[in-house]
């Protein structure tokens, strides 16, 4: 673990919401001493309640915790109506399409568009409180309108990532028993149209009897099949709707949305989030972790099909009254300067993206940032996986100019919002380290019996007290919820939330995430985190990207198999065997001989989803020489799988 520490910029810290570690410790101490009082204070300060709650936390049916019991609110109202007096002419959403088309949508315009959408669903399609609505959408403003419209009328939305296959979409529709599907004909990617509506048509061919209507936003105007009595054009219907719609009065614990985890290893899990606790923490973390202020412009590059897009593109920024950027395209098209051009043009203040994107931007355009004015940036963020030190350093120096704090955020679909993260004005940062739990979050690194691990030892990352934005249950499967999250670790006789991630805590209390426990390789009885090995390999000067998996070994139990993508090198570059030797020397130096890779294969790329996630399950199958059974249609480039297999087989 790196010991060098980077301190927040002094000028930034002076105006930050949480200005130093003393203030952080005061807040964390308050939560520890008076947990319910802490959350009671923030709930009353941040939420515009229709009716007050009677009890802060009900633990009587643990782990099915209830927060702000009896309180009434509407999340759409929290994001829109309450801002209209002071912010009606402020930009709520700045949209940039793949082809460069732009829209600036004010809070008043957003309010009216959401109301029209809500009236369309309620009056034309008969959607009512509690009905499930599946969204299969591109990154366009109508996706945000649809989410907020569902929240306004009390429908439960379930957004399915627009890169998922028809089979994956069908599974989620059936599990949720969705009444309505909202989609688009398609969208644009790298200046070319791609289609979504045909995927919906295929998904609905069997088993989706609950679906009554399909609403289609015409975005790219390619030819699609329209089925009479089922398919309707949003573009034709929306102009007929009133722009006023009274928000449904919702209970604190009513479901707000479902978001399904991947179903590639079994039936997808419908993570269910509630109204009040979710929106409270979404707003608070926007204000604390990104330190978003009134005149800031904030950009998260995620897709709304993931929890990051829910919390930190739509709900969190709008609840905080911020200006949020939505981007349809990819940050490397038409070149690796696209993201930095947008930062310059819109004067972006907070930029939030994935380590994979950072590495790709570094690889494809190491010097591109030098061409643009990035001085507006104040906070940089990472999300989705542990960031390796080389990527962290380039991000910090080339993008942040050595003055922007990097908030390396750890959280999950199930947590609803950030759990462990630096605070940009307060926390001294160790590169590639998530640092400390946020105030009010009781995160600990434990053994399975609930005892804390020793500094430097890897353990299990657990949350030992319930928190407002936590998952409430798995839709339709409460027993699976208990087994999945509260069945592994017991502290003081009580099951606690186990995240599924491993972590190390150092002598200073800093927490570093080592990756999923099932991404831990057991070599001769030694547990080695793949993220740690990958971070070491990336220190080799010729390595651009790497993914490490375990391969069964008769002697060791598991051996280490590394898939390596190289930076551009000239013809004088040595043989693969020589490269493997050099990489293992780096691993031995960084971690130890026990972590040396048994197999290192140079490959042209890694199998990634369109959101940038590396599909390690596919790599495990390739390493084992197994038939690929996973659905590869959701990959950014499905052909990469065969290319990797060729490299491995020889």
Image: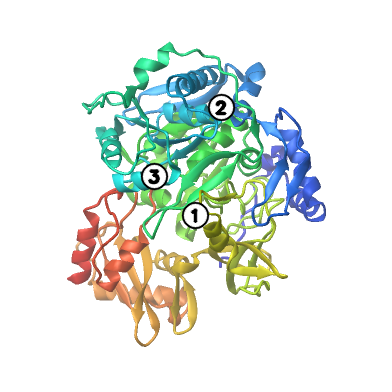
Q: Can I make out residue 506 in this image?
A: no
* Residue ranking furthest to the bottom: 555
Q: Point out the frontmost of discs 3 and 1.
A: 3
Above or below, 493 relative to 497: below
Task: List x then y, in percent, for residue 101.
Answer: 35, 24
- Which is nearer the eye, 112 or 590? 112
**Tag 2: Cα neighbours inside 10 Å, few (<14), some, or many (≥20)?**
many
Q: Quadrant of residue 67?
A: top right
- Which structural element holds mark 3? helix
Do labels 3 and 1 touch, CB within 8 Å?
no
C-alpha span from label 2 to label 1? 40 Å
> Where 82 sits versus 66, above or below?
above
Label 1 packing within 10 angstroms: few (<14), some (14-19), many (20+): some
As drawn, the label of residue 392 is: 1
- On the question of residue 582 being in view, the answer is yes
Residue 99 drawn at (x, y percent) = 31, 28
Q: Classify mark 3: residues with Cα within 10 Å, few (<14), some (14-19) or many (20+).
A: some
Percent from the top left, x then y, of residue 98?
33, 31
User: In this rendering, would 62 be left or right of 224?
Assistant: right
Marks 3 and 1, Cα distance to the nearest angstrom? 41 Å
Which color mode does the image show? rainbow
Residue drawn 30% across and 41% down? 203
Residue at image point 49% right, 54% down:
392
Judging by the rendered image, the residue that carries numbered circle 2 is 152
User: Please, what secondary structure does the residue beneath circle 1 have?
Assistant: helix
Badge 3 is on which residue?
Answer: 174
Q: Earlier in the sequence, mark 3 or mark 2?
A: 2
The reply, left or right, for residue 230 in relation to residue 154 is left
């Amino acid at each position: 673990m790196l010991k060098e520490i980077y301190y927040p910029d002094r000028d930034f810290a002076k105006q930050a919401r949480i200005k130093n570690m003393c203030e952080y410790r005061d807040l964390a101490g308050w939560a520890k001493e008076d947990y319910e009082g802490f959350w009671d204070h923030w709930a009353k300060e941040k939420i515009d309640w229709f009716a007050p709650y009677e009890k802060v936390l009900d633990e009587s049916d643990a782990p099915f915790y209830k927060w702000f019991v009896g309180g009434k609110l509407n999340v759409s109202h929290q994001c829109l109506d309450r801002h209209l007096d002071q912010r009606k002419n402020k930009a709520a959403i700045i949209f940039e399409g793949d082809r460069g088309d732009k829209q600036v949508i004010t809070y008043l315009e957003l309010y009216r568009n959401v109301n029209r959408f809500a009236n369309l669903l309620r009056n034309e399609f008969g959607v009512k409180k509690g009905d499930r609505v599946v969204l299969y959408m591109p990154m366009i403003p109508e996706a945000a309108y649809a989410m907020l419209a569902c929240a306004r009328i009390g429908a439960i939305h379930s957004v399915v990532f627009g890169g998922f296959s028809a089979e994956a979409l069908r599974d989620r529709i059936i599990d949720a028993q969705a009444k309505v599907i909202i989609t688009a004909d398609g969208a644009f990617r790298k200046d070319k149209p791609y289609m979504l509506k045909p995927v919906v048509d295929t998904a609905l061919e069997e088993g989706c009897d609950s679906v009554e209507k399909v609403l289609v936003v015409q975005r790219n105007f390619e030819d699609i099949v329209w089925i009479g009595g089922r398919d309707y054009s949003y573009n034709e219907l929306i102009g007929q709707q009133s722009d006023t719609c009274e928000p449904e009065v919702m209970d604190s614990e009513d479901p707000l949305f479902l978001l399904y985890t991947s179903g590639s290893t079994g039936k997808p899990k419908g993570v269910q989030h509630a109204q009040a606790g979710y929106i409270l923490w979404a707003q608070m973390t926007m204000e604390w972790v990104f330190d978003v202020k009134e005149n800031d412009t904030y950009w998260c590059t995620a897709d709304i099909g993931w929890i990051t897009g829910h919390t930190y593109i739509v709900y969190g920024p709008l609840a905080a009254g911020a200006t949020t950027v939505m981007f349809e395209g990819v940050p490397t098209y038409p070149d690796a300067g696209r993201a930095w051009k947008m930062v310059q043009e819109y004067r972006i203040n907070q930029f939030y993206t994935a380590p994979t994107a950072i590495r790709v931007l570094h690889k494809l355009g190491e010097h591109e940032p030098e061409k643009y004015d990035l001085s507006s940036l104040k906070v940089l963020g990472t999300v989705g996986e542990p960031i390796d030190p080389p990527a962290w350093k380039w991000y910090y120096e080339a993008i942040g100019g050595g003055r922007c704090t990097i908030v390396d955020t750890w959280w999950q679909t199930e947590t609803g919002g950030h759990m462990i993260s630096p605070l940009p004005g307060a926390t001294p940062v160790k590169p590639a380290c998530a640092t400390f739990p946020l105030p009010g979050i009781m995160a600990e690194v434990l053994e399975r019996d609930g005892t804390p691990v020793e500094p430097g030892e890897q353990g299990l990352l657990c949350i030992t007290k319930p928190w407002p934005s936590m998952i409430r249950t798995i839709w339709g499967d409460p027993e699976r919820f208990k087994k999945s999250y509260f069945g592994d670790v017991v502290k003081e006789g009580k099951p606690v939330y186990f995240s599924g991630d491993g972590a190390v805590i150092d002598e200073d209390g800093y927490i570093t995430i080592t990756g999923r426990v099932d991404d831990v390789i057991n070599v001769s009885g030694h547990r080695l985190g793949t993220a740690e090995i990958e971070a070491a390999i990336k220190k080799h000067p010729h390595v651009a990207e790497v993914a490490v998996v375990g391969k069964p070994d008769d002697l060791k139990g598991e051996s280490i198999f590394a898939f390596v993508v190289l930076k551009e090198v000239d013809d004088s570059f040595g043989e693969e065997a020589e490269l493997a030797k050099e990489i293992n020397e780096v691993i031995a130096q960084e971690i130890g001989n026990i972590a040396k890779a048994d197999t290192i294969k140079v490959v042209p790329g890694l199998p990634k989803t369109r959101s940038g996630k590396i599909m390690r399950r596919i790599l495990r199958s390739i390493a084992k020489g197994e038939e690929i059974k996973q659905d590869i249609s959701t990959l950014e480039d499905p052909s990469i799988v065969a290319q990797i297999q060729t490299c491995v087989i020889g």
